[in-house]
Amino acid sequence: MSNFSINVQQLEGNISKIDIGGYLDAHTFDEFESTLIDLFDEGEYKIIVDMSEVPYISSAGAGVFIWAHSQANNNDGDIVIMKPSANVSEVLELLGLDQVFKIVSNLEAGLKTFA
Amino acid sequence: MKEMVVPNDTRYLNDVREMVSSVLKSSSLEEKVSNMIILAVDEAIANIMEHATANQIESDIKIELAVKADDEKLVVMIRDSGKRFDPTGMDEVDMKKHLQSGKKHGLGIFLIRQIMDEVIYTYKKDCTNELCMIKYINN
């Protein structure tokens, strides 16, 4: 059984960084969703999601990104995807999400998207 | 051919992926294609877990998975005793509208259609949903 972890860091400029570790699938997506709901409830809509430790994403996980993107954009924020693995990038491309999300290779580039 | 009975609980999706992966390792499919097939099977089983339980006790649902590969094709057969549900009967997803609406669900069948060459649903008289998904290896 794979482990799944989520950590949230508050950065300067009202930006939050979520580090996800593990498989983001129909079993784990609700933990990611709950984390985002908590941030939205606190008025945090500028979010960088570090995906470097996520080897796999299914539609359940991608669906949370789509929902969160809509929520963030409606509140002058954004969801930025950082360092997706090759496998995750393939899925994002298959869904056309690579054309919708800002995808960055490091934190500095992620922060610049909110500058 | 490999077969397994999948408990109706999303925590077992990891076992499903590992089983499909073990069959694919002996095929000539490239890793990228294999990864997408693993995703398609995950999506199909997760769909059953989401839709199969109306008016039934969750633990009563039986999900059976069989995966077979030869030189020409990979065949995935999934049978479940849950509520009648035809994923192939769902409307085509308009991704642009889907993204605009911010909907969380409904992308599983979109991915399955993108990845697999054939997706065939049959409802058996003994109240069994049967989903056959085929990927041609030289396609």
Image (cartoon, rainbow, N blue to C red):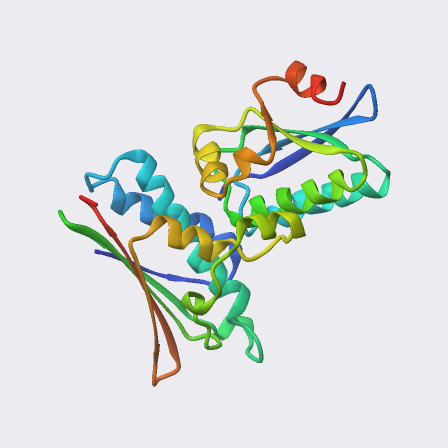
What is the quadrant of the C terminus of chain B in the image? top left
Q: Which residue is drawn at 37% across and 43% down?
A: B36
| Horizontal and vertical percent position of residue A104 | 59, 22
Taking depth in this image into account, of B107 and B76 the one nearest to the observer is B107
Residue furthest to the right: A42
Q: Which residue is drawn at 64% across and 53% down?
A: B103
Which residue is at the front of the view, A29 or B33? B33
Q: Position of residue B87 (x, y in %)?
A: 44, 66
Q: Residue at x 54, y 72 (%)?
A: B53
Tell me, yes or no, if residue A51 can be seen here. Answer: yes
The x, y position of residue B10, in whole percent, is 52, 56
Identity of the residue furthest to the left in this view: B71
Q: B133 left or right of B13? A: left
Nearest the viewer among B91 and A50 is: B91
What x and y, as percent, mark residue A83? Answer: 55, 24
Relative to A84, is B122 above or below? below
Asked if A42 appears above or below A16 in the picture, the reply is: below
Q: Quadrant of residue B75?
A: bottom left
Going by the picture, which residue comes out furthest to the top? A108
Q: In this view, does A81 lie above or below A2?
A: above
> Is residue B18 shown to the viewer in this render?
no
